[in-house]
Amino acid sequence: MAKVKGAIVVDVDKCKGCMVCIPVCPTNTIEIVDKVNEKGYKYMQDVHDNCIGCTNCATVCPDGVITVYRVRL
C-alpha cells in the first residue's frame, strides 16, 4: 500500500477560529495560532508536518475554509 502525505491550506481571512477541526485531526496537525486575520479572528494553521490527508478537518469545517491535498509517496 502506498504511503500518502497530506497538506492543508486554510483560507486565513475566512477562518473564524471555531476550533471544530482540532479534535477530529488524528495527527494533531492543525492548531489555532496567536495571530488574527483581517476580521480580528484567531485562525487555524498547519503547524506540524504530519498531515495524512484524511480530510476530517475540511469535512467538519462549518465555513469550508480548509482545503486538503494528498500526494502518494
Image (cartoon, rainbow, N blue to C red):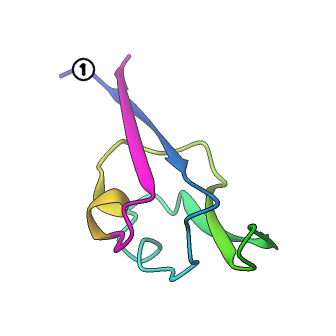
Query: Along the line of sight, which residue is nearer the eye, 73 or 36?
Result: 36
Q: Residue furthest right?
A: 35
Query: Along the line of sight, which residue is nearer the eye, 56 or 4?
Result: 56
User: Tag 1: Cα neighbours inside 10 Å, few (<14), some, or many (≥20)?
Assistant: few
Q: Residue at x 46, y 45 (%)?
A: 51
The image quadrant that residue 41 belongs to is bottom right
Q: Residue at x 34, y 58 (%)?
A: 58
Q: Secondary structure at mark 1?
A: loop
Kind of residue at badge 1: Ala
Residue annotated with mark 1:
2
Q: Residue at x 54, y 57 (%)?
A: 29
Magenta stretch holds residue 6: no
Above or below, 72 against 7 in this view is above
Q: In the rendered structure, which segment of residues is drawn in magenta? A: 61-73
Which percent across, then down, holds residue 52?
A: 38, 42
Query: Along the line of sight, which residue is nearer the eye, 53 or 15?
Result: 15
Q: Where, quadrant-wise, is the N terminus in this rendering?
A: top left
Q: Residue furthest left?
A: 1
Q: Where, quadrant-wise, is the C terminus in this rendering?
A: top left
Q: Residue at x 40, y 64 (%)?
A: 25
Above or below, 56 against 48 in this view is below
